[in-house]
Each structure stands twice: as structure tokens, then as C-alpha cells.
Image: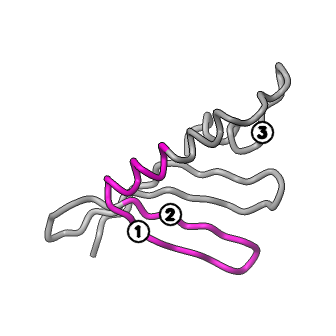
Amino acid sequence: MPTITPLEKLTSPLGGQVIELQQLDHDAGGMSLLRTRIREKSRFTVFEIDPLTARLWGEALLRWAQTQPQAEPGMQPMAVAELQAPL
């Protein structure tokens, strides 16, 4: 049975999708994987990626976010507010 460690839980303010990030470690050892679970109402999408793919994806997300207009001072998207709260 693998060990699953919760890392982050986000809620998209526009579509209401719930995004959960979890670390997946198999009992037999080997590389840890990042499990991403996206829930849209009753539909789930689940996939697991290796550390290199996670790094490249994360960097791509940051590059995109850095090209977007800044939020107004004092305004926080719902997902950011949830990131700051412990699970």
C-alpha cells in the first residue's frame, strides 16, 4: 500500500475546481511521485508525475503567471488564500 502525503489544496475561484497535490511513496521504495487530483463537481482527474516533470510544469506555470497583470493591493484570489492555510 503506498503512502500518500497531502501537500496542498487549492480551489479555483472561477470554476470551483478543487486541486489537491499529494506525494505518493510506494512501499517498495523508488522515486516519489506528485499526484494531482482535480475535482470538478462529481468528475475527478488524477495523474502522477515525476520530479523533473513537476519542476518543468511548475516553471511553466510561474512564467505564465509572471506575464499577467498584478492583482489589486489587498485582493487575493481564493486559491492563494487557501495555499497559505494549513491542510
Front residue of 33/67: it is 67
Numbered tag placed on residue 48 in the rendering: 1
Looking at the picture, which amino acid does disc 3 mark?
Answer: Pro
Report if the CB atoms under discs 2 and 1 are less than 8 Å apart: yes
Measuring from the top left, give residue 4's x and y in whole percent: 37, 62
Q: Secondary structure at mark 2?
A: strand
Report the residue at 72% width, 80% height from top: 42
Position of the N terminus, as image quadrant, is bottom left
Spatial CA distance of label 1 from label 3 is: 26 Å
Mark 3 residue crowding within 10 angstroms, few (<14) / some (14–19) / many (20+) = few
Q: Which residues are magenta?
A: 34-59
Numbered tag placed on residue 77 in the rendering: 3
| 13 is higher (above) or lower (below) than 48 | above
| 86 is higher (above) or lower (below) than 57 | above
| 28 is higher (above) or lower (below) than 50 | below
Mark 2 residue crowding within 10 angstroms, few (<14) / some (14–19) / many (20+) = some
Question: Residue most toward the front?
Answer: 67
- Residue 74 picture quarter: top right
